[in-house]
Image (cartoon, rainbow, N blue to C red):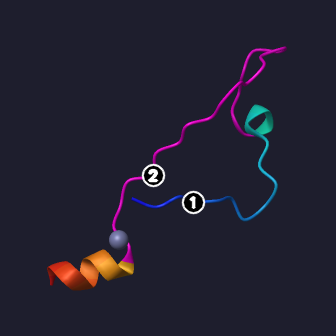
């Protein structure tokens, strides 16, 4: 598991359609997949 960082300034309130006035305290986003190293190790 690795940390991933957005390539541009990321504003969750603009990206997702949230009720007006919603205050985001924390964002957890899980991206499931396999990196090239893991793909090589399994093949
Ligand atoms: Zn990997």
Of the numbered discs 1 and 2, the one sitting upstream in the chain is 1
Q: In which quarter of the view is residue 18 placed?
A: top right
Q: Decide: is 25 above or below 27.
A: above
Q: Which residue is drawn at 78% across and 61% down?
A: 8
Camera-near label (1 vs 2) is 1
Extreme front residue here? 2
Ligand 1 quadrant in view: bottom left
Mark number displayed over residue 4: 1
Q: Residues at badges 1 and 2 in contact (C-beta under 8 Å)?
A: yes
Q: Pointer 2: residues within 10 angstroms few (<14), some, or many (20+)?
A: few
Quadrant of the rendering where the C terminus is positioned = bottom left
Main SS of the magenta part reads loop
Q: In which quarter of the view is residue 6 placed?
A: bottom right
* Circle count: 2
Q: Decide: is 12 above or below 40.
A: above
Q: Does the magenta stretch include residue 23?
A: yes
The location of residue 7, given as percent across then percent down, is 72, 65
Q: Decide: is 41 above or below 14.
A: below
Q: Give the range drawn in magenta.
A: 15-35
Q: Residue at x 73, y 24 (%)?
A: 24
Q: Which residue is drawn at 28% across and 75% down?
A: 38
Q: Distance between the residues labelled 1 and 2?
A: 9 Å
* Residue 10 falls left or right of residue 39: right
What residue is pinned by disc 2? 31
Q: Does the magenta stretch include residue 34?
A: yes
Q: In which quarter of the view is residue 41 placed?
A: bottom left
């Amino acid at each position: 598991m690795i940390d991933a960082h957005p390539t541009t300034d990321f504003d969750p309130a603009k990206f997702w359609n949230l009720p007006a006035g919603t205050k985001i305290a924390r964002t957890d986003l899980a991206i499931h997949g396999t990196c090239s190293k893991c793909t090589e190790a399994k093949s």
